[in-house]
Image (cartoon, rainbow, N blue to C red):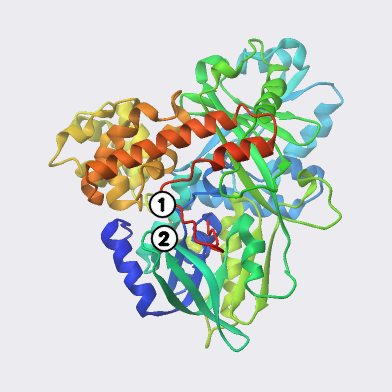
Amino acid sequence: MSSSQLGQAQRLEALARLRDETFDVVVVGGGVTGAGAALDAATRGLSVALLERRDLAAGTSSRSSKLIHGGLRYLEQRNFGLVREALKERSLLLQRLCPHLVHPVPFLLPLQAQWQRPYYGAGVLLYDTLGGARAVPHHRHLSRRAALREAPGLRADALVGAIQYYDAQVDDARHTLAVARTAAGLGAAVATGVEMVDLRRDGARVVGVEARETTTGERFEVRGRTVVVATGVWTDEAQQLVGGSAELKVRASKGVHFLIPRARFRSDTGLILRTEKSVLFVIPWGSHWLIGTTDTDWTLDKTHPAATRRDIDYLLERVNAVFVDPIGREDIEGVYAGLRPLVSAADTASTAQLSREHSVVTPAPGLVVVAGGKYTTYRVMGEDAVDAAARFLPGSVPASATEDTPLVGADGYHARLNARARIAATHGLTVAQVDHLLGRYGGEVEEVLRTADDEPELLRPIEGAEEYLAVEARYAATHEAATHLEHVLARRTHIAIETRDRGVEAAEAVARLMAPALGWDEVTVRGEVDAYRAQVEAERLSQEQATDEAANAVRLDVPDVGETDAAGALSTR
């Protein structure tokens, strides 16, 4: 088996392979769908390349509601197949594939009228039933008094009772990284900083992609017997490279979330609230509450969807309608906006009404395009995409084995969880610190800690982001494909949304921790820190704007480090 390590040496090796090999499957897009397709192909014994323009999970896959769920509201739409499929995936992730990154979480569904109890109760009962094997506790009905004991921060006049049920939450960015690293461990060539600028053809058949290495500008051909495009909200741009009319139309729906301190809302359970458009979640997230989401059309720059003052006010108004102690903008520690890639029908007016099911099409021989879907069903999307690609490959292609392939960090997780007191004592850490590491690295926790064997100071907390240890920033650069400061602050950790200053204080310390692994000199460190701080300031300013257009204009004034400005270049996340 190849190494799942994704450091600088592995990236250079992957780049060399891209130039030299002919792959069975070339996957374009390093979000969870593309990573899932690469892993699926690798489990079938196929040779695989995974290309990502920026960073793994840089787009939608790090900006979700961070839930693994069937979608309770889809039952109302009678989309039982989607819910059943998603709940099966929830069980797989919780019990087998990724128990260190996916955890059960309780939600309280407040009832505003007594007639809602049998109506919603029947739906939640069906939700539990469709979930198959019991991966989470069964739902329970609560009186108003019992509900307020669970969530004393709720207004008593906001409910007559409640139903509590369970779903699961995920560290989305780290999960996508784990999928990609698992694919690399099975032989996939995973290369970030590589964009697709065109498709290569032999007659009508697609036989690879023309790629561009974003740091050097070098163009080269990546040969592939098939190409799978999993570019999410950039699907339409990818289809334009084929020519003719697009077989899929993807609309981008903007979802905004913010985080507040856990102490600002007294509750032992998450909330799910009905809104006039959709649902709104209040989700426990470590020492924070994560609140979202919105669901609005986005037609502007897809790389940097921007939250506006209007988005934030919408969320504040909805939660304050049920909170005893209203929250304000001063309570918000972090904000992020992401784009959902929704397969669109021309006559659909609202993105909230679009299907969360996925579509797979083959617009040309050798080319597969996969779009839509839910984060929860990434594995099914990857399997369906590779099934379609297999029809263009010679011979018989084995069936997918991803259902039985635990992700990096899953093996040994439970054993190390049982040994957390010993691990803490060995390394001079608290059990709480080891628990935090276990929830991010799982069975790899001791490998992470061994990175500090020659530098014990790496076991100290990061100044300005004390929930994280210095060793995590170093490990991100040596093992986790982090090549820029923003990669660590926003995705390998969540410092960018979990600290009130959005990671500004921690930025220089993290950059200096990354520097030895990436060969950065003082000028590079300074450039990374300055660029990150400029990004934070642009995002803060965008969140003061009233309209999407104004917020987008502010954010576009500050490009990300490592972004290309090549004309016609295609983003592939």
- The relative height of residue 408 versus residue 485 in the rendered view (above or below) is below
Q: Which residue type carries mark 1?
A: Gly
Classify residue 148 by image quadrant. top right
- Does residue 400 show up? no
Classify residue 240 by image quadrant. bottom right
Q: Which residue is mark 1?
A: 562
Q: Residue at x 24, y 35 (%)?
A: 423
- Does residue 518 show up? yes
Q: Nearer the viewer, residue 345 or 443?
A: 345
- The relative height of residue 34 versus residue 442 in the rendered view (above or below) is below
Residue 566 x/y as whole percent: 50, 61
Tag 2 or tag 1, which sits nearer the N-term?
A: 2
- The relative height of residue 10 versus residue 353 in the rendered view (above or below) is below
Q: Quadrant of the N terminus?
A: bottom left
Residue 418 x/y as whole percent: 32, 37
Question: Secondary structure under badge 1?
Answer: loop
Circles 1 and 2: CB atoms closer than 8 Å: yes
Q: Nearer the viewer, residue 16 or 97?
A: 16
Q: Residue at x 47, y 37 (%)?
A: 535
Question: Secondary structure under badge 2?
Answer: loop
- The relative height of residue 393 versus residue 88 in the rendered view (above or below) is below
**Spatial CA span between label 1 and label 2:** 7 Å
88 left or right of 476 in image: right
Q: Residue at x 70, y 49 (%)?
A: 83
Residue 238 x/y as whole percent: 61, 66
Q: Which residue is mark 2?
A: 214
Q: Residue at x 22, y 33 (%)?
A: 459
Q: Nearer the viewer, residue 243 or 223?
A: 243
Q: Which residue type carries mark 2?
A: Thr
